[in-house]
């Protein structure tokens, strides 16, 4: 079989690296201006650590908001750790980057969505990535770029 460039996997890694870079900056410098994040992740993914009561409440997927109250944000190569407030109860979490399904910063209308293809029997690394970006332009619908159109079928 001829060797080919797996753009889907490369894009997957690059977008997860973008999230890592953004979170590292926030860990060092705090959230700038109105920036805040909605991060949705797979609670069943290996390496996800959360309180038992949160896992019971969110057995498959959870969205957290990183905005006004968060502590102990630590970013590693393959995961991040953060403590978030749930009803005045601080809860530490560990979230591997590969568990992240969406990353959205609504303050600048930026979003990434990773769609798993594992239900179709494909490798998890072959996730589709959609990117939505709207930067300092007049208000209009966000642009969506899907890698499906470039994928060999």
Image (cartoon, helix red, strand yellow):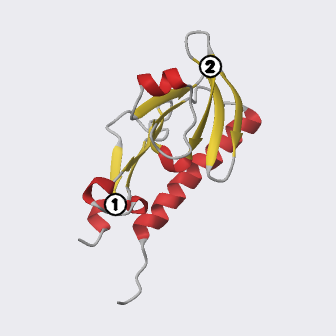
Say which label, 1 or 2, has the lower sequence index: 2
Residue at 44% x, 24% y: name it.
56
Q: Residue drawn at (32%, 63%), measured in percent from left and top?
A: 122
Furthest residue in direction right, as rendered: 28
CA–CA distance between discs 1 and 2? 34 Å
Is residue 117 something one can see in this rendering?
no
Residue 100 marker: none
Can residue 79 be seen here? The reply is: yes
Question: In this image, 143 relative to 97: left or right?
Answer: left
Along the line of sight, the residue nearer the viewer: 145 or 151? 151
Which type of secondary structure does the marked residue at label 1 adopt?
Answer: helix
Q: Secondary structure at mark 2?
A: loop
Rendered residue at 57%/51% (across/down): 18
Q: Nearer the viewer, residue 1 or 26?
A: 1
Q: Quadrant of residue 82?
A: top right
Residue 68's label in the rendered image is: 2
Q: Residue at left 65%, top 37%? A: 81
Residue 59 x/y as whole percent: 40, 31
Q: Residue 147 bears which disc, if any?
A: 1
Please identify the quarter of the rendering in which residue 25 is found.
Answer: top right
């Amino acid at each position: 079989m001829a060797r080919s460039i797996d753009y889907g996997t490369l894009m997957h890694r690059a977008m997860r690296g973008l999230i890592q870079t953004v979170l590292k900056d926030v860990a060092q410098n705090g959230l700038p201006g109105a920036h805040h994040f909605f991060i949705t992740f797979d609670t069943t993914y290996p390496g996800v650590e959360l309180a038992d009561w949160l896992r019971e409440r969110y057995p498959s997927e959870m969205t957290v908001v990183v905005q006004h109250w968060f502590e102990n944000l630590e970013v590693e190569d393959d995961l991040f750790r953060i403590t978030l407030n749930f009803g005045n109860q601080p809860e530490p979490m560990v979230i591997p980057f590969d568990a992240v399904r969406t990353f959205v910063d609504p303050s600048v209308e930026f979003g990434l969505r990773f769609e798993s293809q594992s239900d179709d029997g494909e490798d998890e690394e072959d996730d589709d990535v959609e990117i939505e970006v709207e930067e300092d332009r007049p208000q209009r619908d966000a642009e969506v770029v899907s890698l499906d159109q470039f994928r060999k079928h």
